[in-house]
Amino acid sequence: MPYLLISTQIRLEAGPTMVGDEHSDPHLMSILGATKRSTLGNNFSEYYVNDAPRLVLDKLERLGYRVVSMTGVGQTLVWCLHRE
């Protein structure tokens, strides 16, 4: 899985950080220390870590991921990463 999206709410830039969806690589999620959560009313799960996005980006860089793009969507910050 070479592409990865991570995101956080602007008011939560110190964490938690969403690092994957229910189809994400379980091994990568384990390395990041992520736990799977399902929010009431959603029919899908997401992986979260309590770390700030900067710490998550540092971990992913050590694993070979590079930021391709970053944007703000409403009150959400989103980073797209790719691994060769």
Image (cartoon, rainbow, N blue to C red):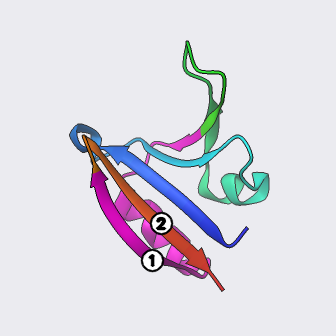
Q: What element carries label 1?
A: strand
Q: Quadrant of residue 25?
A: bottom right
Q: Position of residue 80 (x, y in %)?
A: 47, 66
| Residue 58 is covered by the magenta coloring | yes
Label 1 with label 2: CB-CB less than 8 Å: yes
| Residue 24 is covered by the magenta coloring | no
Bin the neighbour count of mark 1 within 10 Å (Cα to Cα): few under 14, some 14-19, many 20 and up: few
Q: Is mark 2 on a helix, strand or loop?
A: strand
Residue 68's tag is 1
Image: magenta residue range: 47-72
Residue at image point 62% right, 68% down:
3
Q: Which residue lies furthest to the top in this view?
A: 41
Bin the neighbour count of mark 2 within 10 Å (Cα to Cα): few under 14, some 14-19, many 20 and up: some
**Closer to the camera in the image, 10 or 71:** 71
Marks 1 and 2, how far apart in space?
6 Å
Query: Label 1 sits on what residue type?
Result: Val
